[in-house]
Image: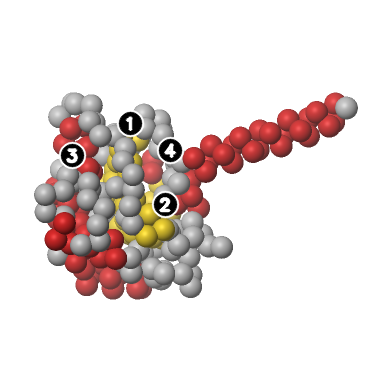
Amino acid sequence: MIKRTLLVGGIAIAALAFAQQAAGPRIGAVAPAFTLPDSNGKSHNLKDFSGKYVVLEWTNHQCPFVVKHYKNGDMQATQKWAADKGVVWLTILSSAPGKQGFLDAAGVNSLRKEQGFQSAATLLDPQGTVGRAYAARTTPHMFVIDPKGTVIYMGAIDSNSSANPADIKGARNHVRAALEEAMAGKAVSIPSSQPYGCSVKYPD
């Protein structure tokens, strides 16, 4: 009876841990830790950026919603604006090999050069481990982490969920607004929103 109770208890704890991981981060909670290599082979640990604002951007260059934000340089402009303010912007690729949007390191570097990425690095997550830890569902899916390591925003890049680049004008850039408010010592007025875009192409 004791062994059965321990077994059932262990299963329940494991199930709870899985459910919590699947749920992803919460606003006001510490962001899930991770270590990933970038397209140049350098390893990045989230703890390395303690004391700085960090933006995580899930991407897939073949997704029309990602194309919307890169085609005319809008995402790159937001990346540069953030970088100029000392923000560490990390683009994350969680597409699995053989799935839409997958690129190897050389392919990522070619794309970064071609499209003029202004993010600090593109991190490679082909197993989807970090994407699932963050419950990243779409491309793009954005997370803003404050200098204490707390998640202060997660969701869409902006307030217009169409795939038309023309609709960016006039939309509220949620990531930029969250950073501006937090840096000014204010509470983030919209800490979460519904992410939109293509589904992240995780391994089967």
Q: Identify the residue at image location x=37%, y=60%.
A: 198
Q: Earlier in the sequence, mark 4 or mark 2?
A: 4
Which sits earlier in the primary sequence, circle 2 or circle 3?
2
| Identity, as a three-letter code, of the amino acid under mark 2 | Arg
Look at label 1 and name its amino acid. Lys
In this rendering, which labeled residue sits more in front, label 2 or label 1?
Answer: 2
Q: Earlier in the sequence, mark 3 or mark 1?
A: 1
**Residue 155 placement, left or right of 83:** right
- Label located before the other in sequence (3 or 4): 4
Query: Does residue 145 lie above or below 65 as drawn?
Result: above
Amino acid carrying label 4: it is Pro
Residue positioned 48% across, 65% down in the render: 96
* Location of mark 4 (residue): 25
Question: Whole-Å distance between the Cαs marked 3 and 1?
Answer: 19 Å
Disc 4 element: loop
Q: With respect to residue 126, does 169 lie above or below?
A: above
Label 2, label 3: how many angstroms apart (C-alpha)?
A: 22 Å
Residue 110 placement, left or right of 177: right
Give the residue at mark 1: 148
Which is nearer the eye, 169 or 21?
169
Residue designated by label 2: 137
Q: Which mark is on residue 177?
A: 3
